[in-house]
Amino acid sequence: MKCSVFIATSADGYIATLDGGVDWLHTAGNLDADISNDDMGFHDFMGSVDCMIMGRKCMEMISQMNLTPEQWPYGKMPIYVLSKTLKDAPYNLQGKVEMYSGEIKLLIRTFEEKGYKSAYIDGGFTITSFLNHGLINEIILTKIPVLLGEGTPLFGNVNKKLKLEKTEVKSFKNDFYQVKYGVNYL
């Protein structure tokens, strides 16, 4: 199964402030740029995956957004949330996500047995865990032109050297840029 990351970080590599905030995603860059018709590839990316695995903190952040059904970006895609501590999803996400506390490789095998081909992996700790299991195939990273100075880093401790290759770079009118990498496990 192909496992892909599509995520944004500050220029200094953080995915959230220390309190979990991501408001800076909407206040950084060239705010005068017309990007109303540019989702920076998210729609195409979502069309390329058929399931999603995210971490608990990522789920909690999405839950706090209280998205309406029209705002829900994941459609009817099956979403599993990795958590060793929570057994139930927040009320506003029940029926949209399923909690999972087992082994990552077993979850991937289960998805493969169900016929899924490509998973969207989201959440810093989850991404690092997948990298440490040798499961991430590509990383699509949008860099936001802001320095947070501190916060939650995208990558935790990766247990071995990884080579990022086959680099593709795109820039956007709002001064964001996106890098797509293939992951080579040395």
Image: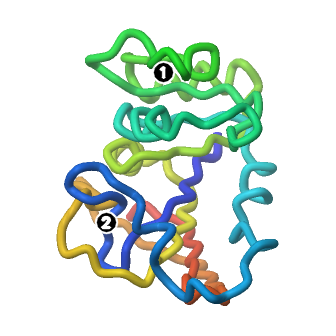
User: Which corner quadrant of the image does residue 36 belong to?
Assistant: bottom right
Decide if residue 58 is on the left or right side of residue 154: right
The answer to whether any part of residue 125 appears in the image is yes
Q: CA distance from mark 1 to mark 2?
A: 29 Å
The kind of secondary structure element at disc 2 is strand
The answer to whether any part of residue 171 appears in the image is no
Decide if residue 172 is on the left or right side of residue 18: right
Residue 106 is tagged as 1
Three-letter amino acid code at the position of disc 2: Tyr
Decide if residue 54 is on the left or right side of residue 140: left
Q: Which residue is mark 2?
A: 14
Instruction: Measuring from the top left, give residue 105's x and y in whole percent.
Output: 46, 28
Mark 2 crowd level (few <14, some 14–19, many ≥20, 10 Å Cα): many
The residue under the point 51% across, 68% down is: 26
Three-letter amino acid code at the position of disc 1: Leu
Decide if residue 184 is on the left or right side of residue 40: left
Q: Which residue is at the front of the view, 84 or 104?
A: 84
The residue under the point 63% across, 88% down is: 32
